[in-house]
Image (cartoon, coloured by chain):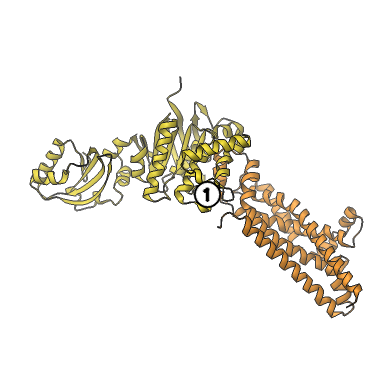
Amino acid sequence: MTEQIIGLLGQGIWETLYMVLVSALFSYVIGIPLGVLVFVTDQNGICRNRVLNLLIGGVINFIRSIPFLILLVLILPFTRLIVGTTIGSTATIVPLVVAAAPYVARMVESSLKEVDSGVVEAAQAMGASRMQIILNVMLPEAKPSLLVGATISLATILGYSAMAGFVGGGGLGAIATNYGYYRYNTEVMLITVLLLVIIVQIFQEGGLRLVRRIDKRIK
Amino acid sequence: MEKEHIIRLEHVSKQFLSRNTDILAVSNINLEIKRGEVFGIIGFSGAGKSTLVRCINLLERPSDGAVYFDDTNLMDVSERTLRDTRLKMGMIFQQFNLLAQKNVLDNICFPLKIAGMKKEKRIKRARQLLELVDLTDKERAYPAQLSGGQKQRVAIARALATNPEVLLCDEATSALDPITTKSILELLKKINQEYGVTIVIITHEMQVAEQICDRIAVMSQGEIVEMGAVKDVFLNPQSETARKLILPDNQFDAEGIAKRVIRIAFDGQSSSDPIISQLTLHSGEMINILGANTENIGGKAYGQMLIQCPESAEALEKIRQYLTEQGIHFEEGGTIS
C-alpha cells in the first residue's frame, strides 16, 4: 500500500468523523425539540394537541420513508442553497441532517416514553410548569436512554455517510467507492470497511460505557 | 381568623370519556376537610379514591363542581395561580415517584428549584427536612439504593419542602410492609401534630385509617357512602362498604353462621382484661373465636374480634347482657346493634 493511500485513508477517517459528528450535532439540535414536541402533544402528553401531533408525526414518517440515496438526490438544490456546493464532506452534512433528524426525533420520543409518568405527575403536583417538566424532569430522567439512542443514531449516520460516498460525498465511503469499487482495489475497499467497523465499535462501546457510568438506576 | 375548612369540594364529579362507555369515576362529592385534621378517604380498588384526591389539586380536572382551597375556587383560577396553589399542597404517592437520576438531596431540593429558590437556601432547607425524616446519612444516595420506606421518607421530605398547608397521600403505605407502614404513619402523625399540616390520606386499609385519621369518608363506586369520625365508623359502620373494609374476609355476613356471630370492637379497653375468658365464665357458654385483629397501643386494646356463639337464644342473650354490662361495643351478624 502506498504512502499516498495511507494519507488518503487518514484524511478519510477525519472527513468521516467530521461529517458524522457535525451531522449528529445538528440532527440532535433539530431532533430533540421535534421528539419532545411529538411526545408532549400525544393524547396522553402534557400539552395534548392532536393536530400538531399528527402534523409532526406525519412529516417525520414521510422523511423517514424515503430511501437515503433518493433523499440525497432529491434535496440537491436545497443542499446547494445552504452550502453552495453538492459535493464533498460539508455538502453531505445537509442530507445527513435531513435524514437523521426525524430518526433522532423518534429515538428521543421513545426515550421519553420510558420516563415514569408518576414522576411527571409528582412534578405537576409540585406546581411545575410544562417547560419546567420538560427541562427538569423528562430530559434529565431520560438521559441514559437518550445516550443509548445517540450511540445507535451515530452508527446509523455513519452508515448513511458511507452511502453518500457513492454520489460525491467525502470520507471513507468515497474512498471505498472510488478506489475500491471503481478501480477494483479490493485491499483498499476492505481496509475502509474495516475502519468503518472499528469506528462503529468505538461509538457503541464508548456510548454504553458512558451510560453505565451516568445511569443512577443501577448500582 | 382562619377559616375552619381548608378544602371544600362541592358537587365534584369526574367523568372519563372512553371509546364505548363514559366512566363516572367520581360522582357528586361534597366534602369539607378541616384545617389541621387527618382526613381519610377509604374504599376498595376502583372506588374512585385516587381520582378524588387528584381532584383536590386538580391533577384531574373535575368535569363538574367546585374545589375550594382556602375559599378560592380552583376551577376558576388561571394556570399560574393553580401552580402557586399547588405549592401549598404537597403530595406523596404509592410508588414514591422520586427522580431516579437525582440523589436524595437534589430530589428534596427539586420543588424548591421549581419555586425559584436560591441554591444555598434550598440545600439548607433540604438538610432540615432530611433531619425531620431521619435520613441525614443518605443525602448523597440515589433512589435505587434506598428501601421502600426510605424512598417514601424522601418523598415526604420533598412534599414538605415548600412548607405546604396540606399533604395529600395517595396510598402512601400500600407498597410497604406492616412495620414500615407503621413508621411512615407515625412520621405523618408527627408532621400533622408538630407542624399543623392538614393531611388527606387515601387508603384501602382500615387499619391505616384507624391508626392515623380523625375523620374518614368511605367511598364506593365514585360516591361517598359514609362519613364521620374514624371511631364512629369503626364501631358502628352504617354502610355495606365500611363493614366489608372492617372485615375483609366477609365471615360476618357468611350465610349459616351469621346469626351466631358477634363482632366485638375494642376501642381502648385495657388490653390486660381477659374479656373472652370472663365472658365464658360469666355466661357459662362455650365461645369460639373465628378471627381477631387486635393491637396493643400503650396498654389499650384496639381492633376487633369475631366470636361464634352457641345456638340457643338463651345463651346468646347471656352473652349480650354481659357485653352490655361491661360497656364493650359489639354487633351481631345480620343486624347492626
Q: Note the chain letter of the orange one.
A: A
Which part of the image, by quadrant, shows the C terminus of chain A? bottom right
The answer to whether A166 appears left or right of B103 in the picture is right
On the image, the x and y values in percent for residue B291 come to: 23, 51
Indicate whether A163 appears above or below B201.
below
Tell me if mark 1 has few (under 14), some (14-19) or many (20+) residues whose alpha carbon lies within 10 angstroms of its own.
few
Residue lying at the far top of the rendered structure: B1
Q: Note the chain letter of the yellow one.
A: B
Question: Which residue sits at x=74%, y=64%?
Answer: A156
Question: Which residue sits at x=89%, y=73%?
Answer: A5
Residue holding disc 1: B18
Quadrant in the rendering for residue A24: bottom right
Q: Looking at the image, how many numbered discs can be counted on the residues?
A: 1
Which part of the image, by quadrant, shows the N terminus of chain A? bottom right
What amino acid does circle 1 point to? Ser
On the image, the x and y values in percent for residue B228 come to: 33, 34
Q: Nearer the viewer, residue B152 or B76?
A: B152
Question: Which residue sits at x=63%, y=55%?
Answer: A214
The answer to whether A150 appears left or right of A182 in the picture is left
Q: What element carries label 1?
A: loop
Residue lying at the far front of the rendered structure: B137
Can residue B29 be seen at all in this image of the molecule? no
Indicate whether B189 appears above or below A101.
above
Which chain does the residue under circle 1 lie in? B
On the image, the x and y values in percent for residue A36 come to: 67, 49
Quadrant in the rendering for residue B275: top left
Q: Nearer the viewer, residue A214 or B268?
A: A214
Indicate whether B319 appears above or below A193.
above
Indicate whether A83 appears above or below B201.
below
On the image, the x and y values in percent for residue B176 come to: 41, 50
Q: Which of A76 and B147 is in front in this view?
A: B147
Can residue B290 be seen at all in this image of the molecule? yes
